[in-house]
Image (cartoon, rainbow, N blue to C red):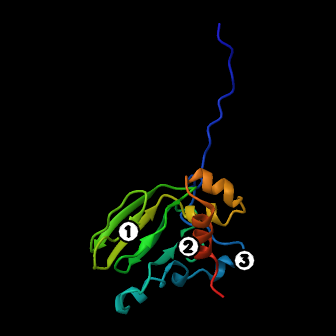
Amino acid sequence: MLPQLPLTLPNAGDPNIISDFIIPSNLNPANVTGTFFTYTGMRTLITADPPKTFTVLKATMEQFPAINGQSVSYAVLLFSSGSVNPPHTHPRSAELLFLVEGSLEVGFVDTTNNNDSAIAVSVFGSASAGTISVPTSVFTSGIEDDILAKSFKTDIAIIQKIKAGLAPMA
């Protein structure tokens, strides 16, 4: 006879959708109008010049409260030529990427490999997918340089150079 052990599975994501929309607690339901459901944060894309660096425009629960409880959010990724979207994870969601224009080499690192810009749209299965940047979380974490050097099979000077590149601009 096998002993029965409790089985616990992790669950990360939005709760089940049980209503058409969720009104934020700081908003009077009587004041909910069509503007609450209208997101204008992407309108700048219509007339914008190509970005000089990698740029992200988001429509998450933070920017667009009307999607709270809808288990969806979006990000438009604007890649200038040769730019890179640093390695990252989304702890509360999967990501689906649609390439709208240009070309990308996509995998663990999103990057343009040529002289053209690119535009992509990411769709998430959460209103608050979150983003954890691997370079920032590793190299600004306070882990000692010698441990990072050993972990990445390099020397302390390289680790310090990487850290210097991630330091906030003054």
Residue 147 drawn above or below residue 65? above
Residue found at x 69% / y 14%: 3
Horizontal and vertical percent position of residue 87: 49, 62
One can see residue 157 in this view: yes
Question: Circle 1 — which element?
Answer: strand
Tell me the crowding category of disc 3: few under 14, some 14 to 19, or many 20 or more residues within 10 angstroms, Cα based: few
| Residue identifier under label 3 | 26
| Residue identifier under label 2 | 66
Number of numbered discs on residues: 3
| Residue identifier under label 1 | 111
Tell me the crowding category of disc 1: few under 14, some 14 to 19, or many 20 or more residues within 10 angstroms, Cα based: many
State the image quarter where residue 99 is shown. Answer: bottom left
Residue found at x 47% / y 77%: 56
State the image quarter where residue 117 is shown. Answer: bottom left
Q: CA distance from mark 1 to mark 3?
A: 40 Å
Give, as a three-letter code, the residue at label 2.
Ala
Marks 1 and 3: CB-CB under 8 Å?
no
Foreground residue among 126 and 162: 162
